[in-house]
Image: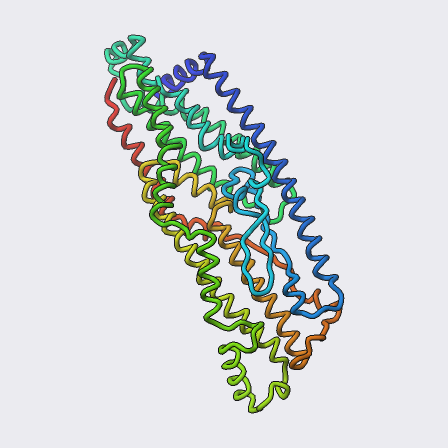
Amino acid sequence: MIRKTFIKESKELFRDGRVRIAMIIVVLLMGVSIWISARQYQNTNDQYEAAKTAERTIWDNQGKKNPHSAAHYGTYAFKPKYPLSLVDQGVDKYAGTSIFLEAHKRNEAQFSAAADQTGLARFGDLTPDFMLLFMIPLLIILLGYNSFTKENEMGTLTLLKSQGISSWKWILGKWTALFLPILILITALFIVAGLILSNLKDFGVFDWNSLLWMYLIYSSYYIIFINLVLFISAKTKKSGISLVISLSLWILSCLAIPKVASNIAEDTYPYPTRQEFVANVLKDKKQGLDGHNPWSKEAKLLKEAVLAEHGVDSLHQLPFNFDAYRMQKGEEHEAEIYFKHYNHLKDQFAKQSNVYKGLAAFSPYLPTRFMSMAIAHTDYATHWNFADAAENYSIATQKFLNDDFAKNSTYGNWGYRADANFWKRLPAFEYSPPKLGTVLSGNITNLGVLGCWLIGSFLLLLFIKKI
């Protein structure tokens, strides 16, 4: 019975010209989106490689220079683009690609791709994640909205009842006929994406396990939609009504609830404005050591403590340059302030994420979206991780420069110049995103909610008794 139902449903699906046209359009759009993303990915990586090499060359060839002058001259930390961003671009377009590292400051990422786009970008981009999250669920609705209603409208339901068919076998046959073409479509998509990514030049090892997890996440997402569409079709008498309800479900799940969740999260746990953030940082800075102000109260206390520690009564008697030592202590104080205020931003982000997780009970789109971005390393959590790694590198760089200044010069000797080969001793900045296991453990709630949606949608099918 399952096999016969499956064959019958499959034939009816592919006899419908609208279905064939819709599937062809989806396949073509998917192919175009992958091609566009692959070109963009390769182009971005080429720019990353060129910028990284050029910036390091500039740093290594500064010539003889005072280390603290080099600290103010600064350098850049560039964020790499990872292979699975081809599938899901996440927030990368808005989050910025590079951070300027300099003394006494912590800067935000800049040069986002969105800043270079025209107003037409508001209409959205044709990307694989757009197709996966929005268009394939629409295709599922088109394929399955009349799975049960057509039996009633065509008068075949009475005939089926008279034959005493098995309810669950009939339902399973229809479910398989709807799921199989979707399964073939997304399997082909992910295989093509995997083959492209495994042959592209990237800046990190392409992980097939991550792609497999993403495949499983999206498969679960589509199964949920299939189950919901079949349930709606079984519980309505007219195909038109079933289509309207299914489309309303898609609008609520994929458009309305995510927007509502975003508004609630922002209103409940708002970020400070840029002006407030800068003012709070400056306020805290004034309450501590300023490495460039030797006359401040904090600088005088530091001077007295250092003189007492070394048993001398003059800064000239110290075995190092106290100016450089004071600047390093100032850097450490300022770094603590920046971490304090950026950690507050991360706390707000975590609270907003909890709002999304709570509202994910009303939309399978939310856990799917966040899991997809996390696995692709294109979510805000990865961006925060990159920003912290860049700041830690900046702190290490300032210590490297100030320590050399302190050890190789004396107090008041601002004319000291490090030799031309000194700069090459600083290791280059390298960033590695969180491993897959870390990503999954950090998204247990999203996985759990998606699992509940999956189980709950199958339980709904148990209530289909209309045969």
- On the image, which quarter does residue 239 sit in? top left
**Quarter of the figure with the C terminus:** top left
Residue 234: x percent and y percent?
28, 21
Occupied quadrant, residue 113? top right
Image spot of residue 164 (x, y percent): 24, 15
Up-down: is 30 above or below 452? above
The one nearer the camera, 90 or 215, is: 90
Colouring convention used in this rendered image of the protein: rainbow
- Is residue 127 in view? no
Apparent side of residue 216 relative to residue 252 in the rendered image (left or right): right
Q: Quadrant of the N terminus?
A: top left
| Residue 12 visible within the image | yes
How many numbered circles does the render carry? Answer: 0
Front one among 27 and 263: 263
| Quarter residue 193 falls in | top right
- The image shows residue 241, relative to residue 155, as above or below, that is below
Residue at image location 47% in from the left, 12% down from the top: 17
* Residue at 50 percent of width and 16 percent of height: 21
Tell me: 389 left or right of 280: right
Residue 112 image point, x, y percent: 57, 44
Q: Position of residue 388 (x, y in %)?
A: 51, 58
Q: Residue furthest front?
A: 295
State the residue in front, 72 or 109: 72
With respect to residue 397, does 453 lie above or below?
A: above
